Image (cartoon, grey):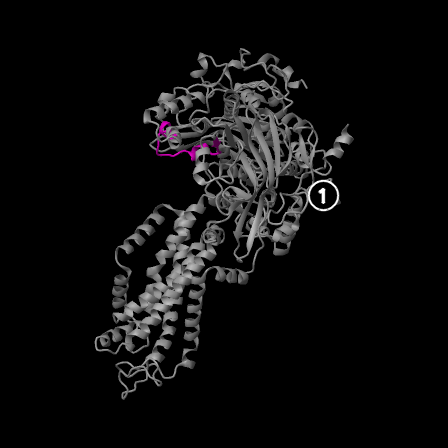
Amino acid sequence: MTTFENFRVEAEPPEYSVGRRMIGLARRSGTATIGLAVVVVFGVVALIAPLIIPYDPVAIFTDRLLQPPSATHWFGTDGNGMDVFSRVLYAARYAFGVAVPAVTISVLIGVPLGLLTGYRGGMFDEVTVRFMDSLRVFPLIVLALAVVAATGQSLLNVILIIGILDSPVFVRLVRAEVLQLRSSTFVEAAVATGNPVRRILFVHLLLNSTKGAMAQVAVRAAWAVRIMATLAFFGVGIEAPTPEWGSMIRQGAEYMATGQWWVGVFPGVALILLVLGFNMMGDGLQDLFDPRRRAEKR
Amino acid sequence: MSPGDSILDVQNLSKFFPGGRGTTIHAVNDVSFAIRPGEILGMVGESGSGKSTIGRAIVGLAHATSGQIIFRGQDITGLPEKKFRGLRKDLQIVFQDPWGALNPRLKVRTIVEEPLRLHTQMNATDRRRRVEELAQLVRLNAGLLTRYPNELSGGQLQRVCIARALATNPELIVLDEPTSSLDLSVRAGILRLLLELRTETSIAMLFISHDLGTVRLISDRIVVIYLGRIVEQGPTEQVFKAPAHPYTQALLSAHLPPDPAIDQGRHILEGEIPSSVTLPEGCFFAGRCPVAVEACSHQRPTMVTLDGDHQAACLRISEGANSIGDAPILGGPKQVSAQSNTASGRTP
Amino acid sequence: MTLLEVQNLHTHFITRDIGNQVQVAKALNSVSFKVDAGEILGLVGETGAGKSLTALSIMGLLRPPAEIVDGSIRFEGEDIVAMQRDELNRIRGAAIAMVGQNPRGALDPLTRIGEQIARVARAHDPQLSNDKATSMAVESMERVGIADPLRRAQAWPHELSGGMAQRVLIAMALINGPRLLIADEPTTGLDVTVQAQILDLLRALVQELNMGAMIITHDLGVVAQYCNRTAVMYAGRIVEEGGTRSVFGDPRHPYTKALIGSTPEKLDFTLDAEVGGGPPNLYALPPGCHYIDRCPKAAAQCNSMPPNLALSATHHALCHFAAGDQARAS
């Protein structure tokens, strides 16, 4: 059944497999395709980085400090004499290694909390929403900096903090959907059928309220990559000499004035590309999950 | 009739909602009726008459402000959801909008199976068999069980809803306007199904509707409701042939027969249903009633028994002045009055 | 006098699906009918038959993905389909007015109703003074039976009951003296006792003002009691059209028969003939008769386009067997 305004067609155009849908979407949305391609390329690089990098990313060549790009060092070397090309590639592992688990944590916290606050309402909802709103008062980056500084420098901490701090996004998205669904007939019918609250939340509501959240996943991944890089830029979180774009940009910034541009520009470009890729992919995901947006884009 | 005879007894049920700015909406006002085992009770009223609220209160989706709902001798008024859940296998509801009443992300099979999963100890094979049996019972092609709701038509979806309600062999089903949002030709199929179900099972039904024609077809007895209050109740044919309350008469005469050859003189009521925020002091219908007298506006009428089960709440019945006109009503007898009621009720 | 003549109207929904394929839902397929001054045409059919879409096509209110792909709509001889936007704007809301369902949703919640009605008058005559427009609004309210119109003009939409809101919309439709009134399910959301009030009003206005009117409804009772002529729609086609008494008294298309037979008054559960199934898939319509899959009388020839058989000067049915039945009946 498809509906055009108030005209109901009790039949549907042919259904497609997920694969066909993706292809169809790809053909229609150039941005999404490019985004997906960029993310996939970075993903593959992250996976096989150890196999393709020419040098150990933390190997120091004391005789080759700050060399410009050349045939031996494609992206040149940095102030410690490390190969920038190998480091930029290897750092993709950290980007994905932080973004994927962090977003997963956000989803795992945000979705159930969104379901519960939306369905239950009352004091619990009130307190949760107020708490989340109060978090928004501080710029998240400042909060993240403070928390990491307080809890200690470790990759795990960075992941946890990004994951937890970003979970309100998912709480809000899911809660908004649930608030609308709560009074819908099928939820009432689920109550009348005798479903316990747990089943209403995790069967009936979950399946119908996560589209918005899922569409946001790629965008939040972009955010996680950015935050991680920012933390590293300030020297918080992942410590040098671990290959990480943020800290590399930080080092590069110091050499910018003296003309050794390659130290900072290459990791910067990599960071921008991946964040852009995730965001463009997010745009496509939103089209995929939201038929209304799809219709508008005809 | 003693409470023991009936499967459901609603006594003095009232339901008020806060109406904003400190006002109160009196949705249901002191309603009492009973449903006998295996019976189809029709509940007729216009929108805003509180009929759906009554249905929802019965299945525990709304909590009564006062009064009692007694199901199988047990007072279920205000029962907390945890305790109510145990009763739900015997007390089911079918909603008006079949497009909205089914989880769009679950397959039809899963939807129909759900009550079995929740209320019985059946294993997967037995559940599967029972679902197929139910599909057959509601005349739903078994091939549709593997589909999602948005692939089915309105009529098919309503059959799925009925199958889900029937799954655990309930004793009472509340049908809240089950055919109102369906197309005419589909509606007929659903009504036929409900009538067949009545003979095949012994499930009692509360059939809530604003459509007189439908209610007449399906109900054994009917209850007419106006502004959350019962104005008349009785065996269907008796009420249709000899409506005693002026509102029932007006309602019947406002019905448009789908046949241009029937040119009925209609009694068009003036005005509209008053607001349920400030209820009239006397008879709720007094303001629009063509036969109202002074007393009607300050004295609440009580139920007057006309003939056996047939009762109406109108002050003017005792004087025989309750008829709003001479026009024939749905092909029934010409004039209705208290004295002639017994006789006319039986006139063919 | 023929006010409106719709000929061969095709309105389709043209979309690109998620697989990036163009999909065409053929919602209206060669719809033709006429409305004369002083008469009420009833357009009946079930969900998705294309009744409202016909009205929207006439009013030029189609929005993508809906598109008129063929046919003409002539209002007083002028083809609306070919008209420019400002030309169309001159006609709609003035010479052709429409009353929709959900009257309360159709009113601007932040404007007093008198002002809203006056606004429609000023939209078509910018030179109109405020006072004149307001007095026209009050006059129009009076004409639709709103008691104490001067005071009511100051009311806000949320203070109105459903029936009163519908009267306000009718007053709004009448203010520019329309020659054709299209009422799309004018009483669907209203109570039974109010429905009759509104329909009586519409009928009286049509006679009084010698307008042409089209009532779109799924309720056979409304058509039977209020319309001079009846057109039955099924899957984007008018399958039967004629005088109301003729169509109801002697329905020739199997769908019309089934529809009338499905009304609670006519429903006979002892018969086994059940109108099963839903409307056909508009994305893949059968080549001939659209009713073929549900028709008890379907035969091989139904795979070809049925003729619009004239049963009398005014009664037509789109069925190969429409005349055959007549022979059998007499």
What residue is at 68 percent from the left and 28 percent from the top?
C313
Q: Residue furthest bottom?
A: A63
Q: Chain of mark 1?
A: C
| Foreground residue among C95 and A7 | C95
Instruction: Give x and y (percent) for residue A172.
Output: 37, 53
In the current view of this chain or complex, which residue is farthest to the top?
Answer: B319
Q: Nearer the viewer, residue B184 or B331?
A: B184
Query: Is residue B10 shown above or below A68?
Result: above
Could you say where residue C79 lies in the image, as x and y percent from the top left?
A: 52, 37
Q: Quadrant of the N terminus of chain C?
A: top right
Query: Could you say which is closer to the camera, residue B80 or residue B141?
Result: B141
Compared with A263, A194 (above or below) is above
Image coordinates for residue B312, horizontal then vertical, percent: 54, 20
Secondary structure of residue under mark 1: helix
User: What's the amino acid at mark 1?
Assistant: Cys
Q: What span is in magenta?
A: C96-116
Residue A80 occupies quadrant: bottom left
Residue linked to disc 1: C302
